[in-house]
Amino acid sequence: MQLVDTHVHVNFDRYQGDLEEVSSRWRENGVSKLVHSCVHPDEFETIKELSLQFPELYCAVGLHPLDTRRWEGETTVQKILNFAQSHTKVVAIGEMGLDFYKDDNNELQKEVCWRQLEIAHQLDKPVIIHCRDAATAMVELLKEFFDTKGKVNGVMHCWTGNPEETQWFLDLGMYISFSGVITFKNAHSVHESAKIVPSDRLLVETDCPFLAPTPYRGKRNEPAYVLHVAEKLAELRNEPLEAIASTTTANAHKLFKL
């Protein structure tokens, strides 16, 4: 059985000193591929080195919505473009998107998100979208972009939206990726959303080192724990674990052209 963890941050300091052990555990749990997301282009050289160190690790490059105050206009655009074109293991643009929960610079976030959608469209790469307390604005922005610039494929990562919001993004052709949040007992809305995503649009992730699933909640998360996400998805959807693993792995390979 193989799994793809479609969203990791193993460049963070919390993995210094034991990343080889962490990688051994993800392999033991069947994680055959990983997609390493990027918060700011300054991270990219480190992420690139990790992708060379671990053959199964691919990467994205972009600017997180909570880092948009560090946006430098065309300078940042060129950095993202250059990185995305210079390394063959770059499979996506992101993470990018909107976060109205932790910041209030909504218009700047929309502008930065739009510019990164343009990069993804130009390079024919999917986007990894972070969306928190911003589903209405995000779906409106995507609709406007698709109508005026053209379609971009992508994934709503670490998805915690309700079923109605989930359907909005499914209708736009987006993939939906679930994280350890789905294992939380009180995440009822997320549980219901997980039941309605078509099999060909379903992905799994850890978003490590954040949001460790039950039974590791509150501890450092790591890619091996994506198995617990898949197990919970299988339970919620009343499907065999092997089917969830096979489906989500195939979807990840298709979206990211792994």
Image: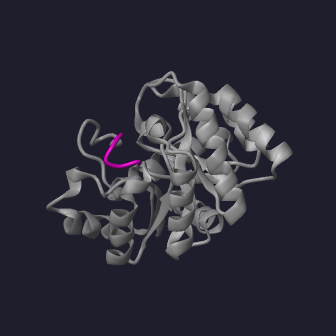
Q: Residue furthest left?
A: 17
Relative image position of residue 143 (x, y in whole percent): 79, 38
Residue 85 is situated, as x and y percent measured from the top left of the image, at 57, 71
- Give left or right: position of 51 versus 105: left
Quarter that holds the C terminus: bottom right
Q: How many marks?
A: 0
Range of residues picked out in magenta: 207-211
Residue at (33% x, 69% y) in the render: 50
Question: For this view, does 3 lie left or right of residue 52?
Answer: right
Give the color scheme: rainbow, by chain, secondary structure or one colour: one colour
Examine the rendering and report whether any part of residue 108 can be seen: yes
Work out whether residue 133 can be spotted: no
- In the rendered image, the residue lying farthest to the right is 147
| 206 to 183, vertically: above or below | below
At 63% from the left and 37% from the top, the residue drawn is 111
Q: Position of residue 7 (x, y in %)?
A: 46, 54
Q: Horizontal and vertical percent for residue 107?
A: 61, 27
Measuring 36% from the left and 40% from the top, which residue is drawn there?
Answer: 211
Q: Nearer the viewer, residue 137 or 250?
A: 137
Residue positioned 64% across, 47% down in the render: 115
Q: Is residue 78 above or below residue 56?
A: above
Residue 44 drawn in magenta: no
Residue 171 as seen in the image, left or right of residue 65: right
Rendering quarter of residue 121: bottom right
Q: Nearer the viewer, residue 142 or 235?
A: 142
Main SS type for the magenta part? loop
With respect to residue 23, does 237 lie above or below?
above
